[in-house]
Image: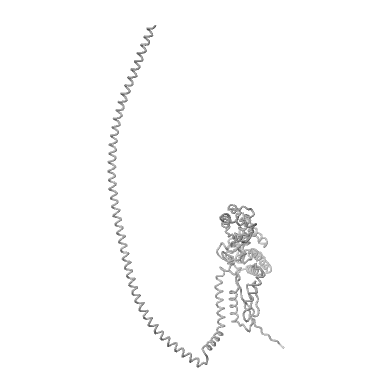
Amino acid sequence: MIINAMKWQNNKRRRCVIIIEIILAAIAALTVGGAGGYMMRKQAAEKQIGSAEEEARRIVKAAESKGEAAKKEKLLEAKEDVHRLRQELDRETRDRRNELQRQERRLVSKEENLDRKLDSLEKKEENLASKEAKLEKSQAAIDELHEKQKAELERISNLTTEEAKTMLLAEIDEELQHEKAMKIKEYEQQVKDEADKKARNIISMAIQRCAADHVAETTVSVVALPNDEMKGRIIGREGRNIRALETMTGIDLIIDDTPEAVILSGFDPVRREVARIALEKLIADGRIHPTSIEEMVKKARREVDQRIKEAGEQATFDTGVHGLHPELIKLLGRLRYRTSYGQNVLNHSVEVSHLAGMMAAELGVDVMLAKRAGLIHDIGKSIDNEVEGTHVTIGADIAKKYRESKDVINAIMAHHGDAEPNTVEAVLVAAADAVSAARPGARRESLESYLKRLTRLEGIAEGFSGVERCFAIQAGREVRVMVKPDKVDDAGAVILAHDIVKKIESELEYPGQIKATIIRETRVVDYAK
């Protein structure tokens, strides 16, 4: 048993020794193989490195040759550019030299001309000096001869120089009275002829247009404030609120020392009304900042547009004129915010429509045509601050655009004499327009100022010699002067009318024009016994 165990142990030791030898042999083999592989790889790498170096030398050599060729090419191009630039410089230099030579020749020529002119002027001065000396001698001789002749004339006529002058001027004044009157009439007619061509483009209520001078009532609106603290809120921080309101409405806000009030100033009445309504809404709301201002301005515009539409519809209803184009009704409503010398144009248009209709009924002509033309005769005033031309021309164009009849268009054109009236209705519209505008108080003048102006007008006419009576009529548009026939003749009447007009122009302020009419009546009375 022991022997078997010893044998088994010896066998086990031998197996272990064999395994160890095998492992050592494998390690040796691996070592030898790794060394051989390393040497082989090293040799291969050295070969690759050698070939790479050879390739690098080849590439460097090729690059050097290409660089040399490119260098030679660039040098050649540079030489060509230098040659070209040198040629251009030579050409430019040559041109400048030629130009300088031309200028030099021109200057030399001018110097020669100036020298010649200077010599000529010197000769002329010498001649003038000699002529002046001769003239002085001649003038002295003439003065001496004149004094001798004057003395001889005084001796012959037994009159002094002043007496003769006074007599001559008196005779000349008498002779020139008639000629003066004729010249005045001639000049007046000439001015009228020329004025007729220009007046249609100037006189069509220019006082209400663009930046013309207006009375305060037609250019400003006043908005009441609950307290003066509201002024600061309207202005806003660094003025941003007032700037926003002025920018959105196109109206100037005047905030001064007036207690609890803000003034809105602007020539466009519609914009001014929008600004007024928007400001009142902002004050009532209490929130005043750029966003709320924009919102309130939009609401105010919609409200004003609605009011304009309602005003136009109400005007057509009051006058009984139907079938107008909707845009015409809107333009008609805009006249609610338009004034002419203080007179509301929409009310004036309605009044003209009624007057024209009444006169048409009396004459037995077309009443509806007269009313229609009378209602829209001033329609051009609704946009005359936006469109070039007189309100007559603008109104006629609007009527054509919305297909109004030829008779209506003619009435619009003829109501201020811009065209000849073709119908009786056109004449009635012009007459109704004059009646509506000329009646006392139509132009919104206070009675006191109206009477003062008429009294002043009559006083100016009565201040002239030979005037018997005078009357201011047509709401101060005309003054009629009755003269004494034994003191003022026909020629003197012309001169008197001219003098009265000149004095009115220098002493009175008035809209439009004032007509002066001189009436001279000669009556011969006898009795049969």
Return the x and y of residue 106 as percentages of the image width and height: 33, 68
Residue positioned 29% across, 42% down in the render: 63
Can residue 194 be seen at all in this image of the molecule?
Answer: yes
Can residue 324 be seen at all in this image of the molecule?
Answer: no
Return the x and y of residue 423 as percentages of the image width and height: 62, 68
Return the x and y of residue 365 as percentages of the image width and height: 66, 67
Residue nearest the observer in this picture, 41 or 187: 41
| Quadrant into which the C terminus falls | bottom right
Residue placed furthest toward the top: 1
Q: Is residue 496 above or below residue 105?
A: below
Residue nearest the observer in this picture, 55 or 348: 55
Return the x and y of residue 59 as percentages of the image width and height: 29, 40
Residue 248 is drawn in which quadrant? bottom right
Residue 270 is drawn in which quadrant? bottom right
Residue 460 is drawn in which quadrant? bottom right
Residue nearest the observer in this picture, 13 or 386: 13
